[in-house]
Each structure stands twice: as structure tokens, then as C-alpha cells.
């Protein structure tokens, strides 16, 4: 227990240090993912009117009015909204300089006074300067928040006529996060002892007099994390459509936009054209504009739909509790796989909980919590690694002289594999034999036989192991090997076939060496078969052998033997052929029943590696395939003609003899399958 609590304290200290550093870098990105994932439609009665590129182009082309526009255009939009019965209008334009068009400021001011419901933004900054008559925009009370930002410098206001006609205004000067993305807005700013609301808060307070600010979960600095609605939550219109609707209405024509759309709505007018440089990136919209940001904040306030942040103290207590629980859980699990699964399950549960809390309106700083859990899992994995490393050294010391390197590596991964247990695996089995070696060994001195055999086995073993095979056993001059165990391989069949082809090439080189020494040349037959077998340590507690058993193994042995029936060197079974298709050049050879089996098996001759197909063989192989198809269909006369033409092909001559026999002894129920009665 002392070690447990010491490790827990160490893990928490590391998490506290690392989490504090990384949280500011990555937590915001996690917040963005959650914001996009859980963006839902907003129900607030908000309509957006865009000063978009379409509107700018319309007045430039049709009225020769470049940007900036005469303020009479905004006046007409306000008149239209006032007549339509809009609850409040937020015009996200400053108008801090007099209009270059004479009388335009008074025109806009007159429309704003008639409406009595128009709000404009204010810009509080720390730049030198001052502005008068801003007190009327201040809140009548100071909210009980400890760290409200103060701006004692300049306040940018509209020109006096427009300022006097405003119903209200609020601060629109806010800064994004360090990565230039807006995720929260500060809703209060202090200037000369008075507290001023944000532009969106001023609009919300006017539109909904029942809004109680003491029920809003502001942070100590007066900020709120934004809960972003999904795209399309707010109705959107081009301002040119509203202006033209007002112009048409003044002349008795039908409006372009139905005024009923704006009845009792909160309307925000703001620029979205890229040329107007009002881009405010958010987690859900990299090209968002300022008035869309105000619309989001406004919707949150009107719907009382907020993201509440967990207090840092409670958050770190939660991290500590999670580390204690996971460390205790992992300590009691012996299996590494179960330990990793348990750690992964806990982390996934925490992730799911974090996303669920966000869906419910609570933002939990996820990164430190995950760091703590990952550190806990990593620490325990390291401790287990050290234990396993010690076990591997003990196993290597005890068994290195009795096992191959491949098997030893597998046992070291899973020491429990030393028990007499087996498992089913898909493997590819390789059997080889030297043609006539028994007769040869009777003619040579024993020491020369052993020398030839050892040289042969050593060279073939090197080839097989280089191809990823596991050399299982030697039985005289026969070699048994397999692929797919202990280590799985998706290319096991092609690896085995390429190994067989390489063995044949190696044997040619070896035969040249034997010839120079006056020794006889050797021939090699190989049978290859893939299938599901039992793999494991077979034997007794005193002597075990890692091997494979099953029908697929027996068939591989039979396929090696029937090479001599066709005059071939390498034959493989149907599944191995399918698994190696496209990687090795194969010839469909026959449909047979080997001795001891009643099930018919398609067999193939392994001709060459896929990249080393012998030139000029396409014709003979195609001709053989044609003859084989005629043979299978029972047209032995036609098949005989094809096979007789392939005089240099041993398998073709075998089938020619069969066709002659079958013509003289027609089978009663021919199914194209040839049955062998000997191995």
C-alpha cells in the first residue's frame, strides 16, 4: 500500500505539472470538437440581415454607389423593419465619422428615433482619448464579479446625431483566444467606475426584460463560453432585399421580402462580405462574422442555454480521484491484455462522460484528466514491462538451447504458451523430400551421406527461414516447415511458394557444387497446403515439440508425394492457390482424391514467382488449360489431341496416357476427379 500511495502521489504531481502546461495548448481544440459535435438549432427569435457581397455589387452596379454606402440606405432598412414590427434592431456598424454624403447622418438618426428600438455597438479601448455622454449606456448596478476588465481610455461612439438617436448600445470590443478563434465573450467592461454591458447583453436585456443576470453563470471576468448553434438556426436575408422592399413599398409596390418574417423578431444587421474585414473565426465557422458572434451570444442569453465551467479545485480533485481508482484497478489485474483493456475502458468512459456533460451544458477540462489516466496506465505498463523483461531473461537462459529463435520469441511474448495447450490457426504447411535419396544413400559411405544431407538441409533451412518460415522438423532427407505460426502472416501461402521456388534454385547451385566433387545430383519435390490446423506444444512435460497437426498437414505431405505422378517439382492445394493468387504463377494441374481422403481437391503446380514468369510459357500453359477443361468435361478424344501436342510437358504426357486409358475404359459416372491409391 505504501508503494501504491507513493506512485499515486507521483502520478498526480506529474499530471498537475504537465496538464497545466498542455491544457492551454490543446484543451481549446477539444472544446472545438465538442462545440461542432453538439451544435443544435437555436430557438431564439433572431434574424440576420447581411451586408453581403451581393448587396454591395447590387448598389455599385445599379445605383453607382460605392462602399461605404450613404446612410440613407440603412435608414430605409430600419424603416422597413420598424413597419414590419421588429422587436429590436442591432445595427453592427459604428458610424464614428460623419457621412461624406450631406444630411445622411440626420436621415439615419431620424429613422432610428422613429423606431426607438435600434442599438449600435460601442468600442471601449485603452487608447488615449475620451468620449462624453456614455453614462446613459451603463448598467444601473454593478454585477458581483471580481475580475471585470477595465478600459480607461478611448470609447469609439457614433457621430452625435446618431448617438443621440440610439435606444442603447454595448461594448463590441473583444479579443479572441491565442489561436485567433472566438469561443467566449466578455459581457461587461468597467470604465470610470461604471459597468457597461456587451452589445449582445444590451440587446438581450431590452428584448427580454425578464432576463435576470444573477442567474447567468458568468465567469469572474464577466465572460461566458459560447454555445454555438448549428448552421441554419437563424433566418438570413441580404440587406439589399430589405432596402428595395422599402423603396417598393414607398411607391406602392409589393415588397421583395414578406414583412411578417420580422414581426416580433430580434434583427441583427452586420457585414459578412469578406472585403469588409469583419471576420471572427469560431469553432463552427472559420469565416464567421462579428454580428454572427453577437447572434450566438444573444441566443444563449435569451434561451438561458449556457456552458458552465467546472471550478478548477473540483476539477483537480476529480483528476486525483480518477488516478487513485485506475491505479488501484490496474494493480489488481494480472493479465496485460485485461489491464490495457481496463485502462482503455476507463479512458473511454471518461471521454464519454466529458462529452455527455458538454451536451448537458457543463464543460470539463478533459486534457488533465486524460493525461492522468494515460500516465497511470503508462506507469503500470512500464512496471509490467520490467517484470516481463525479467521473465524473458529467465526463459531465454533456461530454454535457448532447446528452441528455435522464432519459437523462443513467441514463448517470450507469452510465457504461458509453454503449457500443453493448442489453438486453431490458418497456416501454410511445406513438405519437401529428395527424390531417390534412399537409394543413393545405400551406394555411398555413411560419412559422405551425412555430409551431403547436412549441407542440403542447412542450405534449404536458410532459404526457408529467410522467407519467414518456421522449420519444424527433419525426417531423414524430408523437411517440414510452416508459415502463419507462431507469427501470423497474410502472405503465408505466397511466402511458402516463393521459398519452395528458391529452394529449387538453391538446389541447382548445390548440384553444381556436388558435380564438381563427383557427387550425384539431387532432385527435390515439395508439397504445399493451407488450412486450419491445431498449433501448439505437443508432447509431454519432459519433452515438447512446437508443431502443427490436422488434415491440412496430412494433405501437404500427400501433395509432396504425388509430384512424382506428374513429373512436377512443386504442387499446392486449392486454398493455398487462392491465397497466393496474383503473387505466384500457378498452373491448374488436376482434381484428385489422395490416399486416405474422400473429398476431391483441386491442385496446382507452382510454376514461378509472379515477377519471374518464364518467357514464352503463356502458350503451353494456355494449351494445357484448354486440354484440362476438355478432360474434365469428359471429351477425352479432343483432350488427347491437345495433350499430345505438348510433347515436352511431363504433366501433359501424364494426361495423354490417362485419356487413352479412359477412352478404352469409359467411366460410368465421370466427375473429372482422379483417385490415387498410393502415397
Image (cartoon, rainbow, N blue to C red):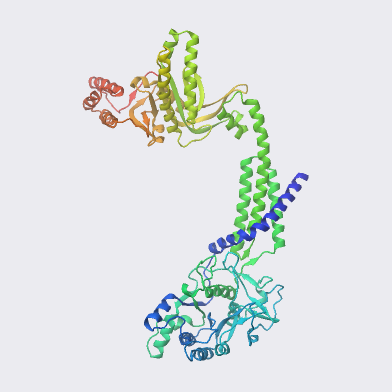
Q: Is residue 531 left or right of residue 195?
A: left
**Observer able to see residue 24:** yes
Q: Quadrant of the N terminus?
A: top right
Above or below, comparing residue 608 to residue 54 in the picture: above
Tell me where residue 31 appears, x and y as whole percent: 59, 62
Q: Which of 661 and 128 is in front in this view?
A: 128
Total label count? 0
Q: Is residue 198 left or right of residue 512?
A: right
Residue at horizontal 64 percent and vertical 44 percent from the top:
339
Residue at horizontal 68 percent and vertical 47 percent from the top:
329
Please identify the residue farthest to the right as the structure is shown: 2
Q: Which of 133 and 220 is in front in this view?
A: 133
Q: In this view, does 474 lie to the left or right of 320?
A: left
Residue at horizontal 70 percent and vertical 48 percent from the top:
327
Tell me where residue 648 appears, x and y as whole percent: 27, 22
Q: Quadrant of the C terminus?
A: top left
Residue at horizontal 31 percent and vertical 31 percent from the top:
615
Q: Which of 119 and 353 is in front in this view?
A: 119
Tell me where residue 221 appears, x and y as whole percent: 67, 72
Tell me where residue 583 appears, x and y as whole percent: 39, 35
Give the image quarter of residue 576. Answer: top left
**Observer able to see residue 273:** no
Amino acid at each position: 500500500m505504501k508503494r501504491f500511495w507513493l506512485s499515486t502521489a507521483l502520478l498526480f504531481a506529474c499530471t498537475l505539472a504537465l496538464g497545466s502546461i498542455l491544457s492551454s495548448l490543446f484543451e481549446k481544440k477539444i472544446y472545438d470538437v465538442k462545440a461542432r459535435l453538439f451544435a443544435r438549432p437555436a430557438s431564439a427569435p433572431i434574424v440576420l440581415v447581411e451586408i453581403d457581397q451581393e448587396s454591395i455589387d447590387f448598389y455599385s452596379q445599379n445605383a453607382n454607389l460605392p462602399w461605404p454606402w450613404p446612410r440613407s440606405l440603412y435608414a430605409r432598412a430600419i424603416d422597413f423593419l420598424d413597419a414590419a414590427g421588429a422587436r429590436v434592431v442591432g445595427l453592427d456598424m459604428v458610424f464614428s465619422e460623419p457621412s461624406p454624403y450631406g444630411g445622411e447622418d440626420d436621415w439615419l438618426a431620424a429613422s432610428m428615433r422613429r423606431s426607438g428600438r435600434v442599438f449600435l455597438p460601442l468600442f471601449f479601448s485603452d487608447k488615449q482619448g475620451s468620449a462624453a455622454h456614455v453614462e446613459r449606456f451603463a448598467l444601473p448596478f454593478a454585477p458581483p464579479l471580481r475580475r471585470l476588465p477595465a478600459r480607461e481610455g478611448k470609447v469609439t461612439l457614433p457621430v452625435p446625431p446618431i448617438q443621440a438617436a440610439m435606444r442603447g448600445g454595448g461594448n463590441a470590443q473583444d479579443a479572441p483566444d491565442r489561436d485567433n478563434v472566438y469561443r467566449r465573450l466578455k459581457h461587461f467592461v468597467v470604465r470610470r467606475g461604471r459597468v457597461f454591458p456587451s452589445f449582445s447583453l444590451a440587446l438581450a436585456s431590452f428584448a427580454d426584460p425578464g432576463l435576470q443576470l444573477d442567474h447567468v453563470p458568468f465567469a469572474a471576468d464577466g465572460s461566458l463560453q459560447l454555445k454555438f448553434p448549428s448552421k441554419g438556426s437563424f433566418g438570413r436575408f441580404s440587406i439589399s432585399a430589405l432596402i428595395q422592399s422599402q423603396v417598393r413599398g414607398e411607391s406602392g409596390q409589393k415588397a421583395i421580402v414578406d414583412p411578417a418574417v420580422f414581426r416580433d423578431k430580434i434583427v441583427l444587421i452586420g457585414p459578412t462580405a469578406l472585403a469588409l474585414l469583419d471576420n471572427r473565426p469560431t469553432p463552427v465557422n472559420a469565416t464567421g462574422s462579428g454580428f454572427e458572434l453577437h447572434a450566438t451570444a444573444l441566443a444563449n442569453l435569451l434561451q438561458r442555454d449556457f456552458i458552465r465551467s467546472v471550478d478548477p479545485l473540483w476539477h483537480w480533485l476529480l483528476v486525483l480521484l480518477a488516478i487513485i481508482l485506475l491505479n488501484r484497478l490496474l494493480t489488481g489485474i494480472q493479465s496485460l491484455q485485461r489491464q490495457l483493456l481496463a485502462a482503455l475502458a476507463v479512458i473511454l468512459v471518461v471521454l464519454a462522460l466529458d462529452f455527455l456533460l458538454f451536451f448537458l451544458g457543463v464543460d470539463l477540462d478533459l486534457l488533465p484528466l486524460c493525461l492522468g489516466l494515460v500516465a497511470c496506465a503508462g506507469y503500470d505498463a512500464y512496471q509490467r514491462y520490467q517484470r516481463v523483461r525479467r521473465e524473458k531473461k529467465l526463459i531465454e537462459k533456461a530454454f535457448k538451447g532447446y528452441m528455435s529463435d522464432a519459437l523462443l520469441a513467441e514463448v517470450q511474448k507469452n510465457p504461458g504458451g509453454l503449457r500443453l495447450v493448442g489453438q486453431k490457426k490458418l497456416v501454410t504447411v511445406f513438405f519437401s523430400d529428395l527424390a531417390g535419396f534412399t537409394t543413393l544413400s545405400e551406394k555411398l559411405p555413411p560419412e559422405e551421406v551425412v555430409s551431403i544431407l547436412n549441407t542440403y538441409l542447412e542450405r534449404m533451412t536458410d532459404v526457408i527461414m529467410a522467407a519467414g518460415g518456421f522449420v519444424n522438423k527433419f525426417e531423414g532427407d524430408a523437411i517440414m516447415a510452416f508459415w502463419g505460426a507462431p507469427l501470423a502472416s497474410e502472405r503465408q501461402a505466397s511466402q511458402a511458394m516463393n521459398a519452395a521456388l528458391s529452394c529449387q534454385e538453391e538446389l541447382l547451385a548445390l548440384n553444381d557444387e556436388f558435380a564438381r566433387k563427383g557427387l550425384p545430383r539431387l532432385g527435390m519435390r515439395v508439397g504445399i497446403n493451407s488450412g486450419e490446423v491445431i498449433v501448439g506444444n505437443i508432447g509431454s512435460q519432459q519433452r515438447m515439440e512446437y508443431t502443427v497437426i490436422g488434415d491440412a498437414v496430412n494433405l501437404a505431405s500427400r501433395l509432396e508425394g504425388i509430384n512424382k505422378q506428374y513429373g512436377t517439382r512443386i504442387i499446392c492445394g486449392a486454398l493455398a492457390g487462392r491465397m497466393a493468387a496474383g503473387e505466384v504463377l500457378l498452373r491448374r494441374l488436376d482434381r484428385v482424391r489422395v490416399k486416405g481422403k474422400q473429398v476431391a481437391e483441386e491442385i496446382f503446380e507452382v510454376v514461378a514467382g509472379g515477377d519471374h514468369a518464364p518467357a514464352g510459357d503463356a502458350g503451353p500453359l494456355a494449351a494445357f488449360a484448354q486440354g484440362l477443361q476438355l478432360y474434365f468435361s469428359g471429351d477425352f478424344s479432343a483432350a488427347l489431341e491437345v495433350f499430345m501436342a505438348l510433347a515436352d510437358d511431363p504433366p501433359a504426357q501424364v494426361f495423354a496416357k490417362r485419356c487413352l486409358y479412359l477412352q478404352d475404359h469409359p467411366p460410368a459416372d465421370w466427375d473429372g476427379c482422379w483417385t490415387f491409391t498410393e502415397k
